[in-house]
Image (tube, rainbow, N blue to C red):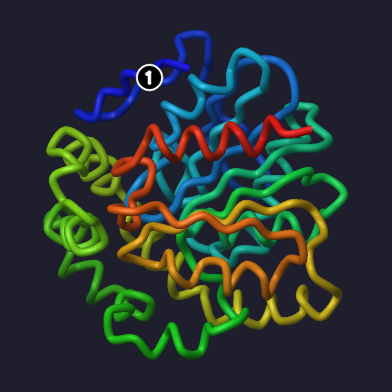
Amino acid sequence: MNEQIDMNGIYPFPSSMKTQTIDVNGTSIHVRVGGQGPAVIMLHGFGTTGDMWGHLAHALIDDHMIIVPDLRGLGLSAKPESGYDKKTQATDIVGVLDALGVRTVELVTHDIGIMVGYAVAATCPERVNRWVAIDAPLPGIGPWDHIIQDPAMWHFGFGGQDMERLVAGRERIYLDRFWNELSYDPARFDEKKRQHYAELYALPGAMRASFEQFLAFTQDSLDNTCLLSQGKLQMPVLAIGGEVTFGPMIGQVIRCAADNVEEVILPECGHWITEEQPLATTRLVVDFLRRL
């Protein structure tokens, strides 16, 4: 693994990785694919796209097949009117795996990606060997009712046509709030990264889709309660949190959903864990995935 990770701008994917569009589950998913070996799929969240995983792809591509989709509605994936509940998006992801001929996979997930990842692992546990869950809660599981009462989570209910009009043309202003307030040091989410992601979130339909990701939490809570009633996950799980954001609660949440959980809190780190601590995050994930 290259020890010198450039913190300025988006870290590029290996040149051997290719992009393609996979039509699945009534939508089109933009996917980056490359490498050979055990498959690893990396799911991003709100405020970024699959572009966040470039450094991890470099670290794993020599002995893994790397699959990096943009979630439904985000990045360069299509932006349909509906389907933003996480069970539907889990079906998107399973469809991507099927289209690529992949039966089993290692899950690496952040933010909204955690929620989609849980739905994949809970509905298709036989297809998930390991799961990395980074810095986010799970709707309906563990201390969820306490989490949604936090005023800082106001954006969970922010959406609709009026909100879309307020944010249209001001996407960067809206996104800066999250990049600044959820960082240990906002400067680590540098200007080139901000410009890159702001342009993607300014694409037609992207902010509407972003709001829908959160507005679906009510349905996600119902779905997760049902999934959890069938039993906890049994595959190994690595729960990683940033010290100054969700970190102290990450283990509590994931242990409510899985039996075999290892917890790590990264110091001097906020929510944007691959942007703020890329080398430490990469080492943790690589070590976890390469264990026998």
- In the displayed image of the protein, which residue is found farthest to the top? 16
Give the camera-side residue of 149 and 226.
149
**Residue drawn 74% across the image and 19% down it:** 37
Residue 98: image quadrant is: top right
Note whether 110 is above or below 195 in the view shown. Answer: below
Q: Indicate the position of residue 269 as horizontal and vertical percent values.
A: 31, 53
**Residue drawn 48% across the image and 44% down it:** 78
Q: Which amino acid, mark 1?
A: Glu
Give the camera-side residue of 89 and 153.
153
Give the camera-side residue of 123 and 241.
241
Residue 222 in view in this figure: yes
Give the side of residue 56 with respect to residue 40, left or right: left
- The secondary element bearing badge 1 is classed as loop
**Residue drawn 24% across the image and 73% down it:** 163
Circle 1 sits on which residue?
3
Give the side of residue 208 with respect to residue 192, left or right: right
